[in-house]
Amino acid sequence: MEENTTTEVPLGLGFARAQQKLKAINNTTLSSSSEEYQNMASTLVRQLRLCLDQIHSLSLFSSNESVDDYSTSELKLILTNAYLGEALQKVNTLEGRVGVLEAALDHYQRFISTCQDLGIGGRSADKLSSEKQQLSLATTSTTDDTNNRTVQKNSGQNRMQRIERFKQLRAMQQEISELETRLAGDSDNGEVEDMEEVEREYAVKLLKLKIHQVTDDMEMLKKEIEMAKQMEKMRRTDSDSRRPDGDSDFKKDSNEWRLDNSRPVFNNKGQPTRPFVLTNERQRIKDGVFRPGWALPTMTVDEYLQQEQERGNIISGGGKDPEPKAEIDDNDHNALDAEVMKQREWDDFRDDNPKGWGNRGGNRG
């Protein structure tokens, strides 16, 4: 059941609900193109935007303050921009996709900026951005021999940096998992812990981990924005090529360029009586130059199966699965003896009734 996000709720409670919904979406088995998944993503976006509006109205975070000036519950609210950027990427829209992705990138940048202003993670965000710039050098190709050596050297360094960052990410995830266990009270340590300090340490480490994840997502998001812009440009070019230049003039003066079809093209002597146009396949061939030579899919596999199920072409249901055979306890001698006798009787029956014994004609053996 969808929650009512228009009702004013406390900021902490609203953020906790949004955090749980995001976790549920990340762990769901639903297809990202399904209607239920998209409804969950849209609801999450509304919840996070409501939390963000409350944060802005309260002016919680300032660049003149540090991490120590905020409580643990306030530190968790810094993740709102990061969560909103992640939620926007889950919204599946064809129209205005570039605007959605740019909004997600903007929220990611605000999250990184807030962490830098408060000194969270030290210089980790600046260090990560410089590493990303070095990684981009490895993707460039050149025919100059002097630059080839530099590219190979940068590729080796980038590979080591990727491995090191992956190890750091795994170590941070392990630390956060241990802190979650301590907060749940399942720790094997018999000492009495200050849960407030543990919760604050958990919030700070969660922010540091999110900085790493957001930095990686930002790089992929920038590439996706470029691809989406190219797709929109190709879509506009394709739509313009299918209609005459100047769509408004075409609609206004459509009768001026049409041919006069009231008279025959040729008279009895074979002379043309009006202008005519020979069939030309040039435009059709031109439109198909950059298109694949096969039919592109019009729906996903899940949509096709859903459509077939609605038509009644998929049989569902059936009987119950057979219950698994219960294992015999080794200490139950009566049951073991009964099983042995059953096997012996079956062997005797097979000896007395060979295979094909009951068949008539030439169907024996």
Image (spheres, rainbow, N blue to C red):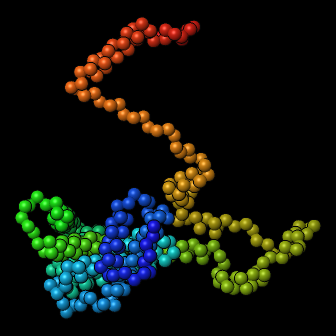
Is residue 94 at least partly visible in the picture?
A: yes
Of the pair 32 and 166, the residue shown nearer to us: 32
Residue pictured at 44% horizontal, 9% vertical: 354
Q: Looking at the image, which residue sits at the far left?
A: 191
Using residue 82 as the reference point, say whether residue 315 is left or right of it: right
Residue 324 position, x and y percent, is 36, 34
**Is 295 above or below relative to 68?**
above
Q: At 15% across and 80% down in the image, what residue appears?
A: 122
For the N terminus, which image quadrant? bottom left
Residue at 58% x, 64% y: name it: 288
How far from the left and from the top, in percent, is residue 352? 42, 7
Q: Quadrant of residue 331?
A: top left
Left or right: where does residue 99 sit relative to residue 130? Answer: right
285 up-or-down from 242: above or below: above
The number of discs equals: 0
Residue 142 visible at all? no
Q: Is residue 45 left or right of residue 132?
A: right
Q: Position of residue 287 (x, y in %)?
A: 59, 68
In the visual, does 314 lie left or right of 347?
Answer: right
- Give how far across and how far down residue 274 sits, in percent: 84, 75
